Image (spheres, rainbow, N blue to C red):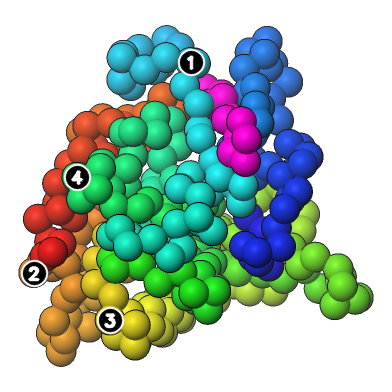
Amino acid sequence: MPSCLDLNTLDGVTSNPNNFPRNVMPNYTDKDSSNGRCELDGDRWRIQFVPTDSRENWMTNGNRDYNDGMYYNLNKQLFRADDFIPTKNSNKLKIMTAGCSHSFGIGVCDEDVYTSLLCKQYDAINWNISSGGSGNHIITLLIRQFFNLGYIPDVLIVQWSYAHRKLFADSTITSFSEPIQFTWQPSDTSTVTNSVSYKAGEILAVKDHTLLLEFITQRDYVISLCKQHNIMLKEIFADDVIVSYLCEYVLPFADFTTGDIPMTLETFNNDRARDNQHYGRRTHQNIAKYLSRNINL
């Protein structure tokens, strides 16, 4: 994900496929490395999905109707979305989705991602700005930046991520002209192998309640942006801890945006994607149906 997104001057940002995010273009070195082909089709990229689990495990636990030849179709800015600039001033309904890899749709075909299903149902433009590994800081900043650039949707779907994912800027940068590196850091630093991320974990280690308070601040900011621009906001959650916190401390004093209570993605779990980690096609269908019931157009 670019650290500074300028949709008007981003020509050529994807000229080097080695710069693609790992969730899109993994650096596999095993015998299956022939997968992961990268093709440029006009201004869009076709990135072949590389299975991250054994075929045996997938056939046992995953969706047997998927194949290894599926592709992610990405726009110039590496989002799994319609082209931004040509659709900015369209009169069609615009649905923007901001989330992590669950909303990017790791391991499922383009047409099976819940964002695609919703946009097909409403004949809407699909601005899916979700990015794998994103925490709620990045989700909030992306929403703000797109709004500031004039990309104002009719409906904003926010798939809030996990509270423990933190935003971190590399402190070794000495010049403002250098790109800023952003990453996320799990609370349990013992599982981290990346030295930069480990450093971030030492610096930014905080208690869970502080993380939850940070999330509330981010959520309130997004709500205020939507009110300012008269945007319909719908929410869904990856983190059951955040949902429990909302139900206990927030919702008794405020109406919720999507149905009566917040729902986690796991509520709709019916299958797994090709990597046996993310949600599969039938789960995405369930999520799309839930959101559709709560979108009043």
Give the camera-side residue of 194 and 68.
Answer: 68
**Which image quarter holds the C terminus?**
bottom left
Q: Is residue 176 above or below residue 120?
A: below
Query: Which residue in the structure is indicated by mark 3?
Result: 230
Choose mark 3 or mark 2, whichever is in front: 3
Q: Residue 287, percent across and down?
A: 21, 47
Query: Which residue in the structure is indicated by mark 2?
Result: 260
Sequence-first tag of 1 and 2: 1
Neighbour tally class for label 1: few under 14, some 14-19, many 20 plus, Cα within 10 Å? some
* CA–CA distance in space, label 3 to label 2: 21 Å
Secondary structure of residue under mark 4? helix
Q: Which residues are magenta?
A: 41-54
Image mark for residue 121:
4
* CA–CA distance in space, label 4 to label 3: 22 Å
Secondary structure of residue under mark 2? loop
Amino acid at dot 2: Asp
In which quadrant of the rendered view does residue 108 lie?
top left
Amino acid at dot 4: Gln
The residue at the point 34 percent across, 82 percent down is 229
Query: Which residue in the structure is indicated by mark 1?
Result: 68
The residue at the point 51 percent across, 50 percent down is 83
Q: Is residue 12 above or below residue 95?
A: above
14 left or right of 122? Answer: right
